[in-house]
Image (spheres, rainbow, N blue to C red):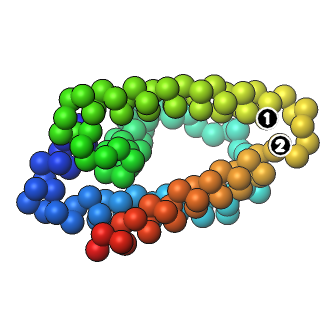
């Protein structure tokens, strides 16, 4: 839905995709810094559970759909049904093994069998991965300004 909406609005505001890319890159960088800073904070498991309303609001505020629609998938995917199906299939083939990989990493982390694979190292690695996504995304957006 984001892709179709961005496509319609960008006809009148051609800088919208570039602005959204910069916003997404900034948000990814913010998340990376936050992950890095909280890597050594100990978990507090004695906390109140998340209610359905809080989960719904967090899902609405999650920028991944906007990021994928504005920066990852090409604009052509939102204009042509054949390209849309092709890009969604490629995305599906990529996301399934990635999900299994993260599930495996989570099970290894939970088992505590590998001492160097701990919360702090995993969060810092994830932070570096996020920065590595943010930099080229920013660069590609700045080139279009």
Q: Which mark is residue 117?
A: 2
Q: Nearer the viewer, residue 134 or 35?
A: 134
Q: Residue at the location (15% across, 56% down)? A: 10
Q: Is residue 118 above or below residue 34?
A: above
Q: What is the spatial separation of the Cα atoms under label 1 and label 2, in whole angstroms?
A: 6 Å
Residue 69 appears left or right of 27? left
Label 1, residues with CA under 10 Å away: few <14, some 14-19, many ≥20: some
Tell me if I can see residue 22 in this picture: no
Helix, strand or loop at mark 1: helix
Q: Are marks 1 and 2 in contact (CB under 8 Å)?
A: yes
Image quadrant assignment for residue 25: bottom left
Residue 62 appears left or right of 83? right
Q: Residue at the location (57% across, 55% down)? A: 130
Residue 78 appears left or right of 132? left
Would you name the residue on which mark 1 appears? Answer: 109
Where is residue 5 drawn, in percent x and y?
A: 17, 45
Q: Earlier in the sequence, mark 1 or mark 2?
A: 1
Q: Is residue 64 above or below residue 19?
A: above
Residue 112 appears left or right of 44? right
Where is residue 92 drawn, in percent x and y?
A: 45, 27
Tell me if I can see residue 119 in this picture: yes
Label 2, residues with CA under 10 Å away: few <14, some 14-19, many ≥20: some
Helix, strand or loop at mark 2: loop
């Amino acid at each position: 839905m984001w892709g179709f909406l961005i496509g319609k609005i960008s006809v009148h505001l051609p800088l919208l995709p570039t602005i959204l890319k910069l916003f997404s890159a900034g948000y990814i960088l913010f998340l990376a810094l936050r992950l890095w800073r909280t890597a050594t904070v100990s978990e507090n498991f004695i906390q109140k559970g998340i209610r359905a309303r809080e989960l719904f609001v967090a899902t609405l505020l999650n920028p991944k759909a906007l990021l994928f629609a504005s920066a990852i998938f090409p604009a052509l995917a939102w204009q042509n049904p054949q390209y849309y199906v092709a890009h969604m299939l490629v995305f599906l083939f990529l996301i399934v093994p990635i999900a299994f990989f993260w599930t495996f990493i989570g099970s290894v982390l939970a088992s505590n069998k590998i001492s160097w694979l701990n919360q702090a190292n995993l969060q810092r690695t994830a932070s570096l991965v996020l920065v590595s996504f943010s930099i080229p995304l920013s660069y590609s957006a700045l080139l279009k300004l």
